[in-house]
Image (cartoon, helix red, strand yellow):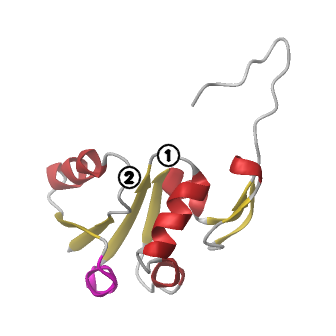
């Protein structure tokens, strides 16, 4: 089983790769659409802001690839956020639209501060 780990040019994808390799998976870190489509499973990791990573996916020609995959796709951290229709981050960002809904900003209160991550 081949696991394609999306390389959107941001984040620590090596950690994700090492985790899957420890589980015995054959991994490839790639931004090549053909390699992603040929993989048995696909992982979308992410570290940064939603708008930045969506623009990276667009530049790499991966937005439509991810939207049309037939195989299982999992999002890790920001990657999961990008699977929704939109995110409130950065003033509102259209995302991949694979999951209905919008990721909303956590509202703090005096007795409930907002986590920094």
- Quadrant showing the N terminus: bottom left
Characterize the local packing of mark 1: few (<14), some (14-19) or many (20 or more) Cα atoms within 10 angstroms.
few
- Front residue of 78/25: it is 78
**Residue positioned most to the right:** 109
Side of 9 relative to 28 (left or right): right
The residue carrying mark 1 is 48
Q: Looking at the image, is 94 positioned above or below residue 52? A: below
Q: Residue at x 50, y 46 (%)?
A: 48
Q: Is the C-beta separation of discs 1 and 2 under 8 Å?
A: yes
Characterize the local packing of mark 2: few (<14), some (14-19) or many (20 or more) Cα atoms within 10 angstroms.
some
Which quarter of the picture shows residue 27? bottom left
**x and y, in percent, of residue 44 in the image:** 42, 62
Instruction: Give the mark nearer the N terminus: 1 vs 2.
Output: 2
The residue carrying mark 2 is 10
Q: Is residue 60 magenta?
A: no
**x and y, in percent, of residue 41 in the image:** 33, 73
Which quarter of the picture shows residue 109? top right
Which quarter of the picture shows residue 117? top right
**x and y, in percent, of residue 56 in the image:** 47, 65
Total numbered badges shown on the rendered structure: 2
Q: Residue at x 31, y 72 (%)?
A: 31
Q: Is residue 35 magenta?
A: yes
Side of 81 relative to 43 (left or right): right
**The magenta segment:** 32-39
Q: Residue at x 50, y 57 (%)?
A: 79
Q: Residue at x 45, y 46 (%)?
A: 47
Q: Looking at the image, is 7 positioned above or below residue 68? A: above
Name the secondary structure under disc 2. Answer: loop
User: From mark 1 to mark 2, how far is it between C-alphas?
Assistant: 7 Å
**x and y, in percent, of residue 92 in the image:** 76, 56
């Amino acid at each position: 089983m081949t696991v394609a780990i999306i390389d959107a040019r941001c984040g620590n994808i090596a950690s994700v790769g090492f985790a899957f390799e420890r589980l015995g998976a054959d991994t490839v870190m790639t931004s090549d659409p053909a390699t992603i489509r040929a993989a048995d499973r696909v992982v979308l990791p992410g570290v940064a802001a939603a708008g930045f990573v969506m623009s990276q996916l667009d530049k790499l020609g991966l937005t439509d690839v991810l939207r049309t995959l037939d195989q299982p796709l999992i999002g890790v951290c920001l990657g999961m956020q990008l699977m929704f229709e939109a995110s409130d981050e950065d003033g509102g960002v259209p995302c991949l639209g694979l999951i209905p809904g919008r990721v909303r900003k956590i509202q703090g209160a005096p007795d409930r501060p907002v986590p920094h991550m």
